[in-house]
Amino acid sequence: MRYGNALSTVIEDITARKIFNSRGEETLEVDVTTTAGFGRAAAPSGASRGKAEVVPYPEDGVSQAIRKVEELIAPELIGVNAEEQEQIDFLLHEIDGTKDFRNIGGNTAYSVSLATADAASSSYGIPLFQQLAGYLASELPYPLGNVLGGGSHAHGKTPDIQEFLVLPLKATSFSEAAKANVLVHRKVGSLLKKSGGAFTGGRGDEGAWAPSMKNEDAFEIMVKACEEVSEGFGVKCGVGVDMAASTLWNSKEKCYVYARDGIERNVGEQVDFVLRLIKDYNLVYVEDPFHEEDFESFSELTKRVKKCLICGDDLFVTNKQLLAQGVRVGAANAVIIKTNQVGTLSDSWEATRIARKAQYVPVMSHRSGETTDVHIAHLAVAFQCPVIKAGVIPGDRAAKINELIRVEEALGDRAKMSVLPL
Ligand code: PGA
Ligand code: ZN
């Protein structure tokens, strides 16, 4: 039920400010006020960004982004109906005038696009997911949680592989699946503490444990923790990874450098290595196992696995052309959706539609630098993403999970879990 009319969604004011993200970096937050509502959104930021992502900020960073909001964007958007998302996003492209948002900044476009959607939902007094997808949206995603890691999200002798993840495979509710992830995170922490050595309880950018450890030892601990939680809690949990392989790739030597393990692998060896990992550890999810330009190895791997999501993040950067290119050659069967990789809600929604049509699993995702903003929880439901990658702890990650617990409660009897093709 909507409690307003189209007039209540007219944009009356747009303001922007500088705040800090979970890494203590400056980021942009935008407020949109409509006749009857208010919306707010802050931009996340990446540490292992794909080459083909839009440019996050204008040359002088967040301060210049604020000026762009005040001087270019607000005058154009004030008076427009916040409900007209496509028009808002079209205008953002028009105002910017470049292909990659280098004029206003992709994070500027992101914050305005999201804050506007938020304001429209607030004007009607309905949740954001319902504003975007209507009353019938009722499927909750499975949470993919970052439990242990290294790569560019941590320092020292942590594993080369950026993220070791847990994915509950079947749960009766979102809350139950979220609890399983918390239990696995906790179990891995206690196994690490018991393993002695130099572990001090340190965690990386996304709250995953960051022990000094070889890659294979990390897999062993993950498998053990998932088995124990699957048995004890009764929710079957699988192990996944984000290899963020572009950060391991040496383009001159044409090899992947595993500095922690002291090993280099050429392209063929990398394919064999990933296949072995999938088999040995029953992996259910593998993100970016190859560098961001190697569609061919992605296709080869995807053809050779069953019941495992092969996901492109840096490979596709939520870009519809790159995704269409991947679909044509069968590269991957899942795609990360990070709206700020492309700038606007409409752009990320288009990529999600292409994914669904090609039977790729869209995975709504946080970034390593986050705020307590909860919009991606709503986007996961609105875009019908069967999986949300949002971390487990601390607060900036739990914020998204907790919002989905609230969404589940609001949906009541209509709430149902997505079905994973696993
Ligand atoms: P980010 O990447 O650091 O660019 O957010 C995280 C990821 O690779 O999924
Ligand atoms: Zn990734």
Image: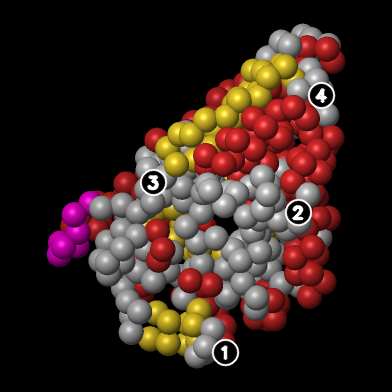
Tell me the residue that label 2 is attached to. 98
Q: Nearer the viewer, mark 2 or mark 3?
A: 2
Please name the residue shown 24% across and 58% down the image. Answer: 192
Q: Nearer the viewer, mark 3 or mark 4?
A: 4
Please name the residue shown 79% across and 17% down the image. Answer: 10
Q: Is residue 400 visible?
A: no
Q: Is residue 360 above or below residue 13?
A: below
Q: CA distance from mark 3 to mark 4?
A: 35 Å
Q: Earlier in the sequence, mark 2 or mark 3?
A: 3
Q: CA distance from mark 2 to mark 1?
A: 38 Å
Residue 348: x, y in percent? 72, 48
Q: Which class describes the residues within 10 Å of circle 3: few (<14), some (14-19), or many (20+)?
A: few
Residue contact at pointers 2 and 1, CB within 8 angstroms: no
* Three-letter amino acid code of the residue under disc 3: Arg
**Res 80 label:** 4
Residue 204: x, y in percent? 35, 54
Query: Toward the viewer: 67 or 398?
Result: 67
Query: Toward the viewer: 199 or 43?
Result: 43
Q: Which class describes the residues within 10 Å of circle 1: few (<14), some (14-19), or many (20+)?
A: few
**Res 268 label:** 1
How many numbered discs?
A: 4
Q: Is residue 328 above or below residue 97?
A: below
Q: Which residues are magenta?
A: 195-201
Q: Is residue 144 above or below residue 267?
A: above
Please give left or right for residue 104 compared with residue 173 in the image.
right
Q: Is mark 4 within 8 Å of ligand 1?
A: no
